[in-house]
Image (spheres, helix red, strand yellow):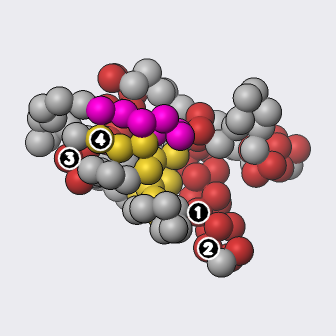
Amino acid sequence: MEFTLNGKKVQIGEVDPTLTLNEYLREDAGLTGTKICCGIAVCRACTVAIQDGPNGNPEPTRSCITPLTTLQGKSITTVEGLSKDGVLHPLQKAFLENFSFQCGYSGPGFLMASYCLLDRLRH
């Protein structure tokens, strides 16, 4: 299985069909910015952006219910993937400057949903 995660190609051998994207991100990839809260896709704290192909738009996707096996050939962006070379994405800066994080737990999901919305508005 192969996909792109935050701009880097990832190749994995056999994948447990019950493994969710959120479990993979947190346990295998070491990316803990994407949170899990309700575990049933209601709260959206676990939202990441998934793009299908180079010309596709990033779609907000709830990682707690997304099987990793469905992501062959896709591009996944997590909250960690928004910043480049240690420089925050303008959206991350805006969230910080406007105190948009409340407790901070659902912030990454809000950021990723906003990122997808802004991309959609641009196109």
Residue 117 seen anywhere in this rendered image of the structure: yes
Q: Give amino acid for label 4.
A: Glu
Q: Secondary structure at mark 2?
A: helix
Disc with the residue nearer the chain's start (1 vs 3): 3
Name the residue tied to disc 3. 69
- Of residue 3 and residue 107, the one placed in the foreground of this image is 3
Q: Which residue is mark 1?
A: 116
Q: CA distance from mark 4 to mark 2?
A: 26 Å
Could you give the CA–CA distance between mark 4 and mark 3, rounded to whole angstroms? 10 Å
Asked if residue 65 can be seen in this view, the reply is no
For mark 3, give the secondary structure: helix
Image coordinates of residue 109 in percent, x first then y, are 54, 49
x 23%, y 53%: residue:
70
Query: Quick check: marks 1 and 2 in contact, CB under 8 Å?
Result: yes
Q: Nearer the viewer, mark 1 or mark 4?
A: 4
Q: Which residue is mark 2?
A: 120
Between 84 and 60, the residue placed more toward the observer is 84
Query: Where residue 2 is drawn, which disc sits there?
Result: 4
Q: Is residue 47 magenta?
A: no
Q: Which residues are magenta?
A: 5-11
C-alpha span from label 1 to label 4: 23 Å
Q: Residue at x 24, y 31 (%)?
A: 12
Q: Where is residue 86, by image quadrant?
A: top right
Marks 4 & 2, CB-CB < 8 Å contact:
no
Q: Is residue 102 left or right of residue 33?
A: right
Mark 3 belongs to which amino acid? Thr
Q: For marks 3 and 2, give the CA distance.
A: 26 Å
Closer to the chain start, of discs 4 and 3, is 4
Q: Secondary structure at mark 1?
A: helix
Secondary structure character of the magenta stretch overall: strand
